[in-house]
Image (cartoon, grey):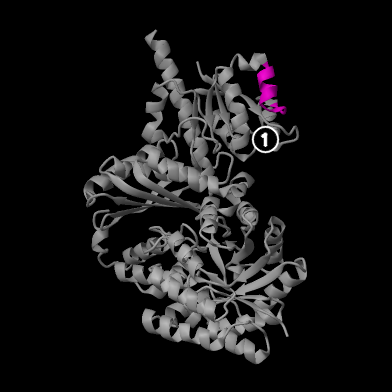
Amino acid sequence: MPKVRITDVSLRDGSHPVFHQFTVDQIVRIAGALDAAGVPVIEVTHGDGLAGSSIQYGFSKTDDLELIEAAAATVKRAKLAVLLLPGIGTIHDLKEAQKRGAKMARIATHCTEADISAQHIAAGKELGMEVVGFLMMSHLIEPAELVVQAKLMESYGADVVYVVDSAGAQTMDMVHDRVTALRAALDAKTHVGFHAHNNLGLGVGNAVTAVKAGADNIDGACRGLGAGAGNAATEAIVAVFNKMGWETGIDLYGVMDVAEDIIGGEIGITPIVNRSALVLGYAGVYSSFLRHAENASKRFGVPTAKILEMVGQRKAVGGQEDIIVECAIELANAQGGKPAPELAAV
Amino acid sequence: MPLNVAVIGSGNIGSDLMFKIFRNKNLKMIALVGIDPKSDGLARARKHDVAAIDTGIEGLLARKDLMDQIDLIFDATSAKAHEHNAPLIKAAGKFAVDLTPAAVGPYIIPPLNLKEHLEGDVTNVNMVTCGGQATIPIVGAISRVQPVAYGEIVATIASKSAGPGTRANIDEFTETTAKAIETVGGAKRGKAIIILNPAEPPLIMRDTVNVMTETAPDQAAITKSVQQMVADVQTYVPGYKLKSGPVFDGNRVTVFLEVTGAAHYLPAYAGNLDIMTAAAVRVAQEVYERRNALVGAK
């Protein structure tokens, strides 16, 4: 019976739909319940990784380090993970997170830029952490090209390399081809992971495909709480994997309760495949752009989907949230109507 | 009499510097220094009748005939190499313009603090980072109007324009730029983000500057100051462009910039590299003017 390790990212990817407003109380209760349900890895960080708190991505209500410390004090069995995007966070930030109890470093780069992660992956290993290389927007390049980048991360010391469908743009065949290629090319000791976004409605299906293709690390979020139409729902992954006969070690009812009572109930957010999210998946746009585009839509009076399309045409990669406002301003000006009042002075 | 200069580092930055020096009638390119005899940069130097030295700074120091002529040395190597080179350049009595992240000397953003530093007895100046050269002038343009509590910049550059040095040590970019946003830009707290974008055709460098003013922003004064600053930067980087803004939202001020390179040697999309070499040449031009003013006064 294959064993699959699930990493729950509700408290990291889920930071996007709550605009990075998680409180210590929410972190403690959600991490505590996930831990009690047997979730082996729990990720806690600002949606855009360590030091993501910014004007560009949104300020955290509570400092990342404080949230990590609170989660570390709560969990008994689970390994605590943090996300770091080189160019945003630094090795200094990783060291601080490790001091507060993070045991896994997930180092994320755009799928063609793995070489900017060498120092951070090495630093994670030096700190005694398990290190995951996280290749974002992996729909953009062919499996053979992705293999080259995955091997770089492996050579820097990554224990696991993830195929990350940041835009929720991959069909099942695309997932199959990428995971298969990585599994075949990487050392047998290196694990392969997959991170889904549900923008095309394929989240859980793609997770299943990934495991069939050789992945043994899968990301989920309770109730799918994540950017865009959310991630593959942890509780649905566990239910499906149980039926497939795949071992996760997670109590299905425990994660169902977190999804239903805390996230759906108290937090009150259930990501869905709506028009804007579908545009993300269809056009291949970074999922966390959604909330920023919705804000820009309100601020400048132009449709969210139009902004996302334009951002896609400009080939924006993860992290380029500033281009959203710029596109919205251009669209507002092109509408010919009167510019937004705040632009009048320009 | 022109200012005689040498460039250490025969890679892309060193080569672009050499071509910019050729175009400046007040600067004379005496030597290009590398460590690889087969480097393209050194071959280009030879073709233009510039002394090409392939034995590093030690090779240059040994050439007394050249050292006697040289007034100023640009260092376009790496932080580690500059830490080795800096004391040697100083001992030889030459002015150093450091394009690496070593930051042995003070940070220079030409329209903000060039004159201030050259008036003192500083003999080594550091050019911060490409993103810093593009964005800190704007932070300074706002902080000269009213106090800035926070300055944050996002630099997006074409993957092809990020060399191996930048890639291997990207934290140096974020940390150095953040520090200079505070010390030179005048923000109480600084933050920098860099993003590499592999799109084809390569995208032109774009930068976003966000600042939080301490009190309600004086929109008219800030707009005027930013436009003036853009014009000042354009005097040495013609491809520097205000794309949009300033846009105001409460105390937040946002400015969108684009930097097209002059394509002297590097392609036009590499505005990030162009603004570094252009700013470094701007420093040398100031050293030249200052020396001539002193000679004139005597």
**Residue, x 42% and y 21% (percent of image)?**
B289
In front here: A97 or A288? A97
Look at the image and tell me whether residue B170 can be seen: yes
Q: Is residue A1 left or right of residue A234?
A: right
- In the image, is residue B39 above or below residue B131? above
Residue bounds of the magenta highlight? B53-63
Is the residue marked by circle 1 packed among few (<14), some (14-19), or many (20+) residues within 10 Å?
many
> Disc 1 residue type?
Gly
Identify the residue at the far bottom of this view: A243
Quarter occupied by residue A310: bottom left
**Residue, x 41% and y 75% (percent of image)?**
A305
Q: Is residue B158 magenta?
A: no
Q: Secondary structure at mark 1?
A: helix
Q: Is residue B168 left or right of residue A10?
A: right
In front here: B58 or A89? A89
Main SS class of the magenta portion in the image = helix
In front here: A179 or A192? A192
Q: Is residue B149 left or right of residue B48?
A: left
On the image, the x and y values in percent for residue A242 come to 63, 89
**Residue, x 58% and y 27% (percent of image)?**
B86
On the image, the x and y values in percent for residue B234 come to 40, 39
| Residue that carries the numbered disc 1 in the rendered image | B41
